[in-house]
Image (spheres, rainbow, N blue to C red):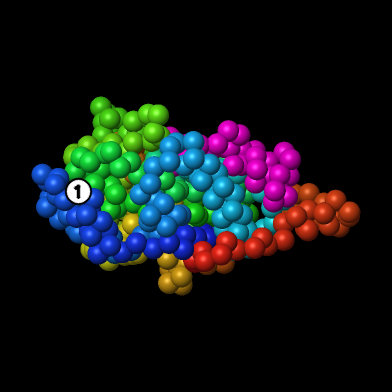
Amino acid sequence: MATLCRPAIAVPEHVITLDETLDLARALHADHPQLGLALRLIENTGVRTRHLVQPIEETLRHPGFTVRNAVYEREAKRRVPEVVERALGHAELAARDVDLILYVSCTGFMMPSLTAWLINAMGFRSDTRQLPIAQLGCAAGGAAVNRAHDFCRAYPGANVLIVACEFCSLCYQPTDIGVGSLLSNGLFGDAIAAVVLRGRGGTGVHLERNGSHLVPDTENWISYGVKDTGFHFQLDKRVPGTMEMLAPALRALAVEHAWDVSGLGFYIVHAGGPRILDDLCHFLNLEPAAFRFSRATLTERGNIASAVVFDALARMFEEGGVEDGTQGLIAGFGPGITAEISLGSWVGAPLEAMVPRRSRAIDTAELTIAHRTAPLPRPAGSTITE
């Protein structure tokens, strides 16, 4: 009876608006032969504001991959713990109650994963399992939900913490001036998300079924060129049309569960761009309002990669959720071309009471853990949402 609880979200304090993005593109690429096309594409994304982990002046500099990755590690360690604390609070759990940490990111690299640092720094048990997901891009948010669901089915009563840390601005490459690259420079934003899947109890989405689908022979449509200067994002012009290929997979999974994908009560999907959402409306016979949470994320924060589905889900919680038993879908789309899909029903009250799985006797060790898991200071100037 695993339930996906309320996510916690944080975005960095540095903000860039659409007008500022367009002005930068005009200034930096005044002689670009397709500047007009790039500007129109950026305007058509619907993105109005994005948050950056560094000021725009620093973002536009490229001091080399070594320095950039050091920024990634420093800012992840500075910003992630506070988001994790809030997600645990939403789930009414402590660090010691978590059995698996799933860490999702495609915008920086650490080995060992940040999961090891979190276990040491935040009082998680030393036998907490770790599962980093680094190469599924924007689909990784949906994949993390699915792998967490699989774990809870294999280990009934287990709790899973998912953390998504995406600093897309650290992948800016000033030498990449193709139209697709210029579009990406105006589309992606930075964010951190954390959410708990509770094996017992909890309020949120009770997960019932999950599935994956890869469109054959599209593995080069979304990719990274890994070079001395870091990760170079590569986007094929055919990507915006992929929902015609993926919508049938969403419908097929719902049919397997005896549900009608066009008649569900909520939809939490990755907002890669406005056409993704518009095409889903067309191919699934839905009204635009069905994707209002994903559209709001895209408008206010841009494409925040694997964190999109968690930001959109958080917005549904902010709206007050839906009626108990309402059926819905969660889906992430990304490189492959891959869809990671979950089906679940809203639970406004815990399905069953939390059953203690280990002694709760307070001793010296637990007091030490309690001290270590006290809320950490919030990074100066950061913006948080529940």
Q: Quadrant of residue 155?
A: top right
Taking the spot 85% from the left edge, 51% from the top edge, the residue there is 365
Looking at the rendered structure, the secondary structure element under dot 1 is loop
Looking at the image, is 93 positioned above or below residue 170?
A: below
Q: Is residue 105 left or right of residue 334?
A: right
Q: Nearer the viewer, residue 19 or 340?
A: 19
Taking the spot 78% from the left edge, 58% from the top edge, the residue there is 371
Q: Nearer the viewer, residue 149 or 173?
A: 173
Q: Amino acid at mark 1?
A: His
Would residue 194 be counted in the magenta stretch? no
Task: Provide the residue span drawn in magenta.
Answer: 107-135
User: Residue 223's spot in the image, x, y percent?
Assistant: 32, 34
Q: Residue furthest right?
A: 364
User: Residue 43's spot in the image, x, y percent?
Assistant: 20, 59
Q: Nearer the viewer, residue 319 or 27?
A: 27
- Which residue does the numbered mark 1 point to in the structure image? 29
Looking at the image, is 204 positioned above or below residue 2?
A: below
Q: Is residue 202 left or right of residue 284?
A: right
User: Residue 150's spot in the image, x, y percent?
Assistant: 53, 40
Q: Is residue 204 visible?
A: no
User: Residue 47's spot in the image, x, y percent?
Assistant: 28, 60
